[in-house]
Image: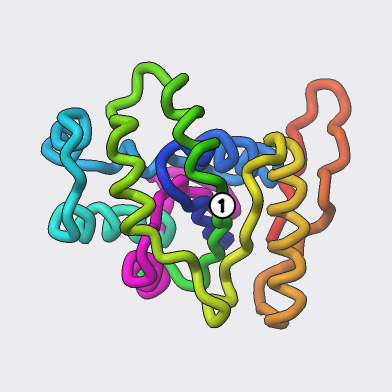
Amino acid sequence: MVSIVVMGVSGCGKSTVASALARELGLEMIDGDDLHLPESVAKMRAGIALEDADRWPWLDRIGAYLAAGAPGSRAQGRVVACSALKRAYRDRIRRLAAPVQFVFLNGDAELIARRLALRTGHYMQPELLTSQFRTLEVPAADETDVVKLDISQDVPQLVAGAVAALRRLQAAAQSSLTPLTSLVPTAPSAGAARPAARI
């Protein structure tokens, strides 16, 4: 099974990239925001930053999803959009759902702030971005299961870059996971199911 976390601060494009990556690879996907408790959502809607006490149970739910998936799912793996801002948060997910790979969407604070200003209908308030950047611990060199992508690229470029980088990670680590069958899956014939690219 494949477990991928698309991570980064609010507004970096996690949900969009995670959804596109899941489609590309034929995997199941969930937005980590959907696993927050109502109390946490209410805090963020009010512009109140979450504390670790709010986040630990949320991270446990994300880890459990990656490890087990949705009931009845036959997907070969899962993708989650999750901020995973601190090393401790990523380590928590690793302990629950190893092996897991992270795709870190990295970008300039001004660019992300502009994107957040244009976003509507989301409970995460733009003023919390400063808090998120303050909390962010950029993945260190010893976090060898993390690939870093520049969000100035468009979504197709980010997805292609993520797939290529994940393949390189696996080759470098000589992972026991099955490698991707192709960077871009062959287009299916009319009426046929799209083949899943496997990791």
Q: Position of residue 13 (x, y in %)?
A: 53, 38
In the rendered structure, does residue 147 fall within the stretch colored magenta? no
Q: In this view, does 73 lie above or below 192?
A: below
Q: Is residue 168 above or below residue 3?
A: below
Quadrant (top left/top right/bottom left/bottom right) for the C terminus: bottom right
Residue at figure coordinates x 25%, y 52% from the top left: 58
**133 or 121: nearer the eye?**
133
Q: Which amino acid does label 1 sit on?
A: Asn
Residue at figure coordinates x 68%, y 35% from the top left: 155
Secondary structure state at the residue bearing disc 1: strand
Q: Where is residue 195 in the image (x, y as percent from the top left)?
A: 76, 42
Q: What stretch is highlighted in magenta?
A: 68-95
In the displayed structure image, the side of residue 190 where residue 171 appears, left or right: left
Residue at figure coordinates x 74%, y 80% from the top left: 172
In the displayed structure image, the side of residue 124 where residue 99 appears, left or right: right
Q: Where is residue 101 in the image (x, y as percent from the top left)?
A: 56, 64
In the rendered structure, does residue 75 fall within the stretch colored magenta? yes
The image quarter in which residue 24 lies? top right
Q: Which residue position is annotated with label 1?
A: 106
